[in-house]
Amino acid sequence: MTTFDERETEFEAKFAHDADTEFRIVARANKLFGHWAAGKLGLTPEAGDDYARAVVHAEFEKTGHAGVFDKVMADLDARGLGVAAADVRAAMAATLAEARHQIMDV
């Protein structure tokens, strides 16, 4: 195997590792965000766990974070809680930072 082939293999392995890590970070962030929203919705701990799982799955319904944001905003609006979109986006950013910290510092 040539040096070029070795470097290519190493870059592919790093890319795969980075993609896996980013997936885990986003999934953890969505779960944390789901728990945040469950708290706003006043759900019990058990219902909050189920809701957090539903938020994680919402990531796959639309590209990017739009599915997660839309689900949580719709649920908050349906309860008439009056939570501003800016507050929801701030919570998403905070949970993403927390998830990144949890995953990267393990």
Image (tube, rainbow, N blue to C red):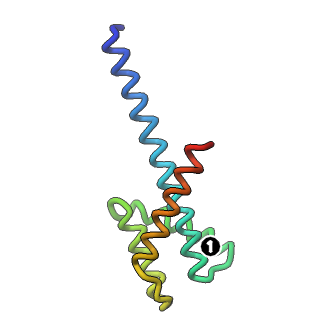
Residue 105 locus on image (x, y percent): 60, 43
Residue 40 locus on image (x, y percent): 57, 80
Residue farthest to the top, as pictured? 1
- Secondary structure at numbered mark 1: helix
Vertical placement of residue 85 versus 60, above or below: below
Residue farthest to the right, as pictured? 45
Amino acid type, label 1: Gly
Residue farthest to the bottom, as pictured? 80
- Left or right, residue 88 beside residue 3: right
Q: Residue at x 39, y 74 (%)?
A: 70
Vertical placement of residue 46 versus 83, above or below: above
Q: Residue at x 43, y 74 (%)?
A: 71
Report the quarter where the N terminus lies: top left
Q: Residue at x 68, y 72 (%)?
A: 46
Report the quarter where the C terminus lies: top right
Q: Residues within 10 Å of mark 1 (few under 14, many from 20)?
A: many
Residue 39 locus on image (x, y percent): 61, 77
In the figure, residue 19 lies in which quadrant?
top left
Q: Residue at x 49, y 43 (%)?
A: 21
In the figure, residue 77 lies in which quadrant?
bottom left
Residue bearing the label numbered 1: 48
